[in-house]
Amino acid sequence: SQQGEEDPQALSIQEGENATMNCSYKTSINNLQWYRQNSGRGLVHLILIRSNEREKHSGRLRVTLDTSKKSSSLLITASRAADTASYFCATGDVPGAQKLVFGQGTRLTINP
Amino acid sequence: ETGVTQSPTHLIKTRGQQVTLRCSSQSGHNTVSWYQQALGQGPQFIFQYYREEENGRGNFPPRFSGLQFPNYSSELNVNALELDDSALYLCASSPSAEPGNEKLFFGSGTQLSVL
C-alpha cells in the first residue's frame, strides 16, 4: 500500500520558474527521501532528510519536513527542461533498512 | 548512472509461467532490495537481502522469492505468474543495512509483461 500522497499529481511550468511538490505520509518515520524517475526507468536519489531535521538543501533543491503535520515539500528552483520527470517521496521507518514506502509521484513537465 | 545493473531489460511471459530476474549490485554494496512498480504507481517494496539473508519483506505472496549470492548479486523469482504481475521490477542496493545507509541506488529495471 502507498504510505504517502503527493500533490499535485501533475505539474506543468515554464523553464526558469520554480516547482514545488508536496508529500504527506501517515506513520512515524526515521527518514524521508525524494527520488526522480525519467520515462519509467530507474529511480535516482535526490535528497534525504531525517526526522530530526527541518530543512535541507542540495544545489537547486530544497526539502522541508514537518513531522507534526506528517508532510514534506520539494522545491526545485530555476527549473530546466532536463528536470522533466516524475518525482517520488519515500519514507523509511527503520534506520539502515531499504524498505521504503513510496508515494504515487508527481509528474513534472518543464516547458521551454 | 548508478553501478546497479539488471537483466533482462524486457521480458514477456505467459500466465502460469515462472520468471527469474537478475541484479548486480553496485561495487562495495552488500544490501539489495527489490521493488515492483505498476504503471502509474510508486514502487512497492518486495523484500531486502543483507549478507545473503532475507531480512525484510513487504506484502507479497510466497511465490515471490529471492536469493543473494556471495558476490552480493541477487535474483528475484516469481512463480505461477499472474496478469497483475506485469510491472517494472526495480533492484536497489546500498553499502550495508546499518544506520546511515538508507539512500538507495537503483538499477534501470526489468519490464515484465504477463500475457
Image (spheres, coloured by chain):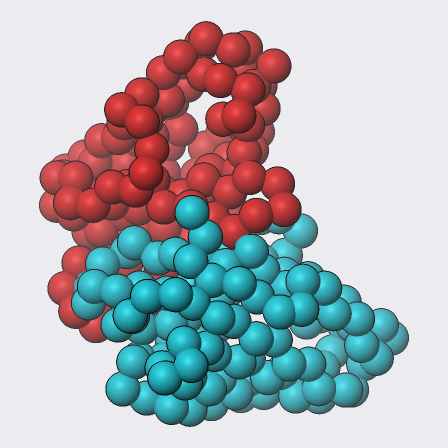
Could you say which is closer to the camera, residue B22 or residue A49? A49
Residue at image x 64%, y 81%?
A: A20
Could you say which is closer to the camera, residue B38 or residue B4? B38
Residue A11 showing in the rendered view: yes
Residue at image x 48%, y 84%?
A: A63
Q: Whole-percent x and y of residue A45? A: 45, 66
Does residue A98 appear left or right of residue B11 in this picture? left
Which quarter of the figure has residue B98? bottom left
- B27 lies above or below A24: above
Q: Which chain is cyan?
A: A
Q: Which chain is red?
A: B
- B67 lies above or below A101: above
The count of marks equals 0
Could you say which is closer to the camera, residue A18 or residue A7? A7
For the C terminus of chain A, which image quadrant?
A: bottom right
Does residue B99 appear left or right of residue A49 in this picture? left
- B42 lies above or below A111: above
Residue at image x 72%, y 64%?
A: A10
Which quarter of the figure has residue B39? top right
Residue B1 showing in the rendered view: no
Q: From this viewpoint, which residue is outermost toward the right? A: A112
Q: Whole-percent x and y of residue A41? A: 58, 48
Does residue B75 appear left or right of residue B108 in this picture? left
Residue at image x 33%, y 33%?
A: B60
